[in-house]
Image (cartoon, rainbow, N blue to C red):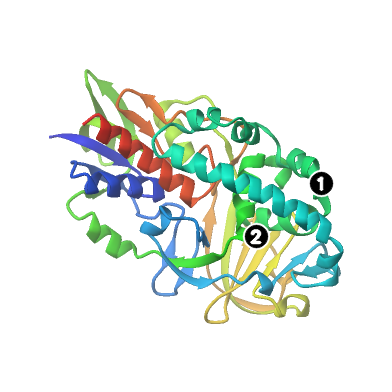
Amino acid sequence: MLKKTIIVGGGLAGMSCALKLEQAGLDYLLISDRLGGRVMYSMEEKINYGAYFVMNNYKHATKLLSKTNLVNPLHACFHNSLTERFAVISLHTLRLLPEFINFFFAMREFAGHYEVYKNRCLEMTQRDALNADAYMAGLFEKPASEFIKEKNYERVADDYISKFAYACTGVDIKKISALDFLNVSMGILIPIHQFIFDEKKMAEKFNGHLETNRIKKIEKINDYYRLTGDNEKIYEAEDVVLATPASVTQKLLNLKEIREACQLYVFHVEALLKPNYQKYELNLFPASSEIILTARQHDGSYLIYSRQAQVDLNLVCQNHKLLSNVAWEKAMYVQGRAYLEQQYAEGLYIAGDHNGLGLEPAAISGIFAANQIIHHA
C-alpha cells in the first residue's frame, strides 16, 4: 500500500515531523528501531544515558520531552588539572569579569540572530536561512577559536566556556564551528533542565503510525520511493523523510561527505568521588582529559562521561560500583564543515542535527520537512 509519507528514524527530528503531520491530519508511517534517537531515558532508573539537558528556549524539543530538575550552574566546578579548579563564584571569576562582560555581549548579539534563524528554519532550508543573514553564515564557516579571539574572551573560554562545550560535544572547541560553539554556550546563560522522555507513552501517541524496523535500502521508482527493511519488508511512499543519524543517511543515499562524529561513553556508578570533586553536582574537565564530566544524580549516584571506552574511573573516584554503561560510537556529528541538503530530491528530505548541533535544531529540521510536505499536499 502506497503511503503519503514515510519517516525513517524516531529521534527528535523524526518524532517532530510525525507530530506536525499528525496535527495537519496527513497520513504518515514512522519507522524506527527505537524512539528517542540520541535521547535514551531509563524510566526505571530515572537516568538520561544520552542527551542530558534541554534549555529553556527549546520550545519545539520540549513538545516531546518533559523538563524536570534545574541544573544549577552555581553547583559546577571547572577543572584545569588535579590542583587547579574554579567554582562559578570565586575570586578567579571576578578577576576575569571584563572578559565575562565581553562574552555576555557576544552571546546577546548571537541570541538575537539565532532566534530569527531558528524561525526561518521552520519554513526554509538551513542553507537559505544562513544565506539570509551574513552574520549567521559567517559563524557556520568560522572556527570557534577564531570567534573567541575576535571577541576577546580567550581566558574565560579556556577556564570555563570551553569545558562546558566539551561536556556538550565531547570534542575540543578547536574542532567545532563558531555556530555550534555559541549554540551550546547559551547553556551558560540560559536556564537548563534535565528531562524525562516516556518512550512508551510516545509510542502510544503514534499508535497506528509506528512500525519497528530498520531501513537498509531506498530507491526511486517512477514517482514514488521504495524502501526495504531489515526483514525484507517493502514500503512505498510519495514522500520520504530520512531522520536517521548522518552515517546512516550517508549509507542510504551514498553521500560523499558528512561531518565527523565524536564518541561518548556514559558510566552510571555508585561512587565516592575524590575530595576535589565531592562538593559539586557537576565537575567539568578540559579537552585534554579522558573524563569529560561527572554529574550527580537524584539518588546520589553519578554519571561519568568519557571519550574513551576503557577509561580509568579511579581518576575521579575513591571507590565505585558500575551500575550500567552505554557506548555512543557516533554520538554527535560536530566536526568539519560538510553540509547535508535538507531537500535532497523531489519528495525526499533529510532531517536531523547534521548541520547544527542540538535537540532543538533536530526538532526544527523535522518540522521543516513536515511543513514542505504539508505545503505540497
Residue 110 circle label: none
- Name the residue at 41% across, 59% down: 62
- Name the residue at 40% across, 61% down: 65
Residue 188 circle label: 2
Report x, y in % for residue 367: 36, 42
284 or 374, which lies in front? 374
State whether residue 319 appears in this view. Answer: yes
Report x, y in % for residue 363: 41, 47
Q: Which residue is mark 1?
A: 152
Contact between labelled residues 1 and 2, with CB atoms less than 8 Å apart: no
- The crowd level at tag 2 (other Cα within 10 Å; few <14, some 14-19, many 20+) is some
Q: Mark 2 is on which residue type?
A: Ile
Q: Quadrant of residue 59?
A: bottom left
Q: Secondary structure at mark 1?
A: loop
Report x, y in % for residue 205: 24, 58
320 or 154, which lies in front? 154
State the CA–CA distance, disc 2 to disc 1.
17 Å
The earlier-in-sequence mark between 2 and 1 is 1
237 or 180, which lies in front? 180
29 or 90, which lies in front? 90
Report x, y in % for residue 83: 86, 70
Furthest residue in direction top, as rendered: 222
Question: Is 297 placed left or right of 46 in the picture?
Answer: right
Q: Mark 1 is on which residue type?
A: Asn
Question: Is 5 placed left or right of 194 in the picture?
Answer: left
State whether residue 333 appears in this view. Answer: no
Relative to 321, say whether 328 is above or below: above
User: Image quadrant for the C terminus?
Assistant: top left
